[in-house]
Image (tube, helix red, strand yellow):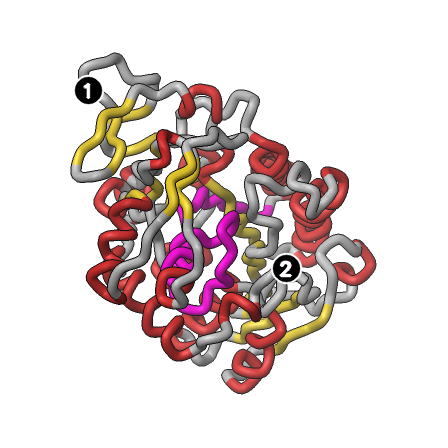
Amino acid sequence: MKILISGVCGFVGSTLARALVERHGRSEIVGFDNYIRPGSETNRAPLEQLGVKVITADLRSAEQIHALPPVDFVIDAAANPSVLAGVDGKTSSRELVDHNLAGTINLLEYCKRHRAGFVLLSTSRVYSIATLASLRVAVEREAFVPDAAHALPPHLSSAGLTESFSTGAPISLYGATKLASEAMALEYGETFDFPVFVNRCGVLAGAGQFGRAEQGIFAYWINSWLRQRPLRYLGFGGNGHQVRDCLHPRDLVPLLEKQFAAPKLSVHARLLNVSGGARSATSLRQLSDWCLARFGPLEVLRDGTPRQFDIPWLVLDPTKAEQIWQWQPVTSTASIFEEIARHAEAHPHWLELSAPR
């Protein structure tokens, strides 16, 4: 099988490429990247040494995508993944749409032409911000949990949000580009009869993730703590109780393998939450406690100022993926944190490498 990975030199793309090579030495892995993410160019040579063919191309260029060699399946791992994209002054709203939505359409046109399957790595940020921001929460073990004393929104439980949870606006410009990409991907697949899968991922984390607060909070926090860089608990009283789930990208590979080999399936079976679920859920305060035990003390400043798009608790329920695909993640949150810590110790300039230029 020949597989094409967009954003192959990013953290997720490069992790998937390495894992696929390790598990399937006979598969041919091709990837492309435009190296717009600071630090991504460092992944090119190691991937090429593994036999991955890395092509310089821009997802936003229909002509460049058209020129890529034919493959059997495409994994779309390229995106501007920040919920603040388009409103933070670093990228324009038009740039965000061109990259995250128009780029996906370019890949779908490519799949239509070559009869290739398509896997979209989507996000938990397609779910309604207003509903989640108003969620009643309690504090347990220094972390928010849904408050069982109040009625919970439909399709949300202590296990997380199901795929049926509201995707009504507002979901941020970033979330909207991914939700629109999901809809277009599923429509292209139905209209032109090629397999399409949408995997809504929780927070992806692991060694080699570029440490940016808005795009890789676990890696950023651990790298910053080790280097004694200033850290702040933002919003929610400045206590660090806000919670996210955690998933290592390599744990996606067994699911991808099943999707590559799957027969024609209903749309219902092809749109999934893919995450570490409630057992991986971690607050910033809990992460700080882990860092304290691992590295020693660091004072974290408290800033309770609310921020746009902030959510107290966002955990995806992966039950559907377990039931339909018999898939479960195998890398524990503690193992992910330790992997990041060891990488941070071995790469003392990682924050500078991945900082905006």
Mark positioned earlier in the residue sequence (2 or 1): 1
Residue 230 higher or lower than 233, as above or below? below
* Residue holding disc 2: 356
Residue 243, located in which quarter of the rendered image? top left
Residue 116, located in which quarter of the rendered image? bottom right
Mark 2 residue type: Pro
Q: Closest to the observer: 228 or 249?
A: 228
Residue 335 in the image, given as x and y percentages of width and height: 25, 63
Q: Do the residues labelled 2 and 1 touch (CB within 8 Å)?
A: no
Instruction: Report the Cα–Cα distance between label 2 and label 1.
Output: 42 Å
Is 236 on the left-hand or right-hand side of 56?
A: left
Instruction: Identify the magenta region.
Output: 194-222
Q: Which residue is drawn at 31% across and 41% down?
A: 318
Q: Residue at x 42, y 24 (%)?
A: 133
Residue lying at the far bottom in this picture: please name it. 49
Residue 64: in sight, yes or no?
Answer: yes
Is 190 on the left-hand or right-hand side of 206?
A: right
Label number found at residue 148: 1
Q: Residue at x 45, y 36 (%)?
A: 266
Q: Residue at x 31, y 25 (%)?
A: 156
Q: Closest to the observer: 124 or 270?
A: 124
